[in-house]
Amino acid sequence: MATTPTYDRSGGGEQAGAGWVMFAGIMLLIVGVLNVIYGIAAVDNSKFFVHETQYILSGLNTWGWVTIILGALEIIAAFSVWAGRGFGRWFVILVAGLSAIGALLSMPAYPFWSLAVFAIDILIIYGLAAYGGQPIEA
């Protein structure tokens, strides 16, 4: 009876899911920086956003401040998940969940960006919930 050989496709003994954890951290950092930039633009009442829109809660200026705060939390969370502690994993899941909710609530201001951030946040939550936040070894 012949057996089929199995190969390690992970690239040499990496922990299962280390790629998802790295992906979650990188995407969280990128989205965090961009959220801070978009938040500053919203506070400044930039012409980039859709004007004369109705928001569920408050206005564009308030959502700008919410986006700045979420962006700062996302940047902190990215470094927290790379540290690999259990707290970092749950902190990132919490921040990504808040960011996903915030993205859906700010959809009148920038609809396509909100949907993109929502999708990325769901992938971040999946990656950390499924594979955890173990330290990534170089």
Image: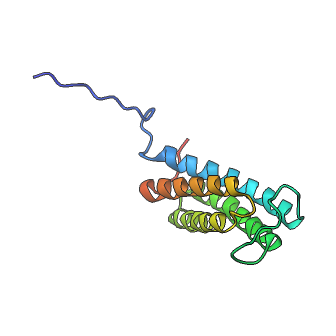
In the image, residue 85 lies at what x, y percent?
53, 62
Residue at x-position 88% and y-position 57%: 47
The part of the image, by quadrant, that contains residue 87 is: bottom right
Judge by depth and name the residue closer to the eye, 6 or 51.
51
Residue 137 visible: yes
Judge by depth and name the residue closer to the eye, 38 or 92.
38
Residue at x-position 77% and y-position 65%: 68
Q: Is residue 66 left or right of residue 3?
A: right
In the image, residue 20 lies at what x, y percent?
50, 47
Q: Is residue 5 left or right of residue 85?
A: left
Q: Residue furthest bottom?
A: 58
Residue at x-position 69% and y-position 54%: 113
In the image, residue 116 lies at what x, y percent?
63, 52
Q: Looking at the picture, does residue 114 appear above or below residue 13?
A: below
In the image, residue 94 lies at what x, y percent?
56, 68
Q: How is the image coloured?
A: rainbow
User: What quarter of the picture does the N terminus occupy?
Assistant: top left
The part of the image, by quadrant, that contains residue 55 is: bottom right
User: What quarter of the picture does the C terminus occupy?
Assistant: top right
- Marker count (numbered): 0
Residue at x-position 68% and y-position 63%: 107
Q: Is residue 129 left or right of residue 110?
A: left
Q: Residue furthest left?
A: 1
Residue 133 visible: no
